[in-house]
Each structure stands twice: as C-alpha cells, then as structure tokens.
Image (cartoon, helix red, strand yellow):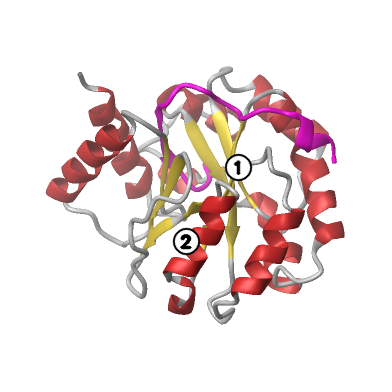
Amino acid sequence: MALEAGSKATTAPRVHVGTSGWGYPSWKPDFYPKEVPQKKFLPYYAGVFNSVEVNFSFRQMLKAKTVGDWMQQTPDHFLFAVKAHQQITHFKRLKNAEESVKFFASSIEPLFTAKRLGPVLIQLPPNLKGDLGLLREFLMIWPRAVRCAFEFRHSSWLNEEVYAALRERNAALCIAENEELQTPEVMTADFIYFRFRKPEYSPEERRKIAAHLRELGADREVFAFFKHEEDPKSAVWAKEVLDAVRLD
C-alpha cells in the first residue's frame, strides 16, 4: 500500500484544536461574521484553528478534487483529522476489512502525501463489544504510517489488554466524553486524541482543558475537537481553548 512508505504528518510536538466540521451557517454571527459566505467558511475557519475533524468521510469517500480544494484554502500547517468510512467500522465492523481499508487509504492519500493528514478516527458502533482478537487482526491490515485513534463506545473495550494492543501499533485510545461514557485518559501512542462531546463546558472547565492540553503538548502531539452540529458554542469554546493554549 502506497501509504506504508510515508512519514508522519508532523514531527514537532504541538497542540491542534478545532471542531468536528466547519460548514454550519447557524454559526453566524457568533463565530462566522455575517459577511462571510458559506463557500469561504473553510478559509475563515483555518485562520482561527489549526486542525479540523472531517466527519464527511464517514459516509462518502473523499474525492481528490475535494481534498485539493481544501488544501488550497488552508495554510500548510493546517491538518485534517479524518473519520474512517462506515464501510470499515459499521458495515464490516473491522472484520475482513482489508479491501475497504485499501480503498479508504487511497482516498486520503493526497492529504497524507502533502503532510496535511492528522490521525484517522476509527469510531466503533456502540453495540460492538470488546474483541481483542478482532482488534489485533485489524491493526495488522492498517497502514502503519497512518496514525489512527480508536473511539470505543462500549465499556468492554476499556481494559489493559486492549491498551497493550494499541501500544504495539502506536494507535491512540480516543479520549471521548459524553453523557453516557467517559473514556479513561490512557496514553497508548506518541500522540493523544480528545473528543469533547458534552453539551456544556463551564468557563472553569474550559480553562482546565486548555491548561491540560498545553501540559500534554510539551512532549507529545495533541489533537482535540469539540462537538459539531448547529450550535455555534462548540466553535466559540474551541477558539477560547486554543487561544489559551497558545498563551506563554
């Protein structure tokens, strides 16, 4: 697989903060100014943040032209974390997924080649229970050069054997929090991936998140994404956190 020959998107430890998606007209005027048209949302977004989580790729394979347009509209340091296609995670449920992985890998290769690819988020269905053998088999077919983060949404995955399997392949445990499940903060890779999904984060919680991300970023690469959807609060909070992280 062509992606096997590459290198990681970045080398120096740093903190990447953003949201899951950017194309929301309802974010006007709280985040996007009224005068910014929707076709200019991404350039504006990339002027504020240094990364985004692409959920679009869950249902549709990325096209080269689309990816090319995204890269032209964003600065060279801006990274795209990409959600794995549902064919891999929800239809195949990681089993016998080699052909699906190859097809998906070919769709993200332009980002990888340009060193604009962040980690791939592998979000498993809530009803997929822990299966260490399945995980190990899947990790064997995943391109080693492509960083990935696993979001386990069934508590049976959260155990030391699973963490050890992730560490063997430098795959991250996605630290996700919502109203149903809180993933423990266990380091399994040389980068860490957060998904902040709660409906509310108080000012004090946001200050603590920023301080924690800044501390972690001293020795590893950090990716953190706030919940998307129509409410502009996620973008406002993410900007506040990234601004605080950047403070000396």
The circle on residue 220 is none
- Circle 1 sits on which residue? 147
Number of marks drawn: 2
Q: Please identify, in this view, whether the residue under mark 1 or under mark 2 is nearer the observer.
A: 2
Q: Position of residue 93 (x, y in %)?
A: 70, 72
Q: Position of residue 122 (x, y in %)?
A: 60, 57
Residue at image point 53% right, 20% down = 77
Quarter of the image with the N terminus in it: top right
Name the chief secondary structure element in magenta: loop
Question: Disc 1, disc 2: CB below 8 Å?
Answer: no
Indicate yes or no whether the magenta region holds residue 2: yes
Helix, strand or loop status at disc 2: helix
Residue at image point 25% right, 59% down = 200
Q: In this rendering, would 223 be left or right of 239?
A: right
Depth check: give the residue in front, 71 or 213.
Answer: 213
Q: CA distance from mark 1 to mark 2?
A: 16 Å
Q: Position of residue 20 (x, y in %)?
A: 49, 48
Which region is colored magenta?
Answer: 1-23
Callout 2 crowding tier (Cα within 10 Å): few <14, some 14–19, many ≥20: some
- Circle 2 sits on which residue? 163
Q: Height in image: 36 above or below 55?
A: above
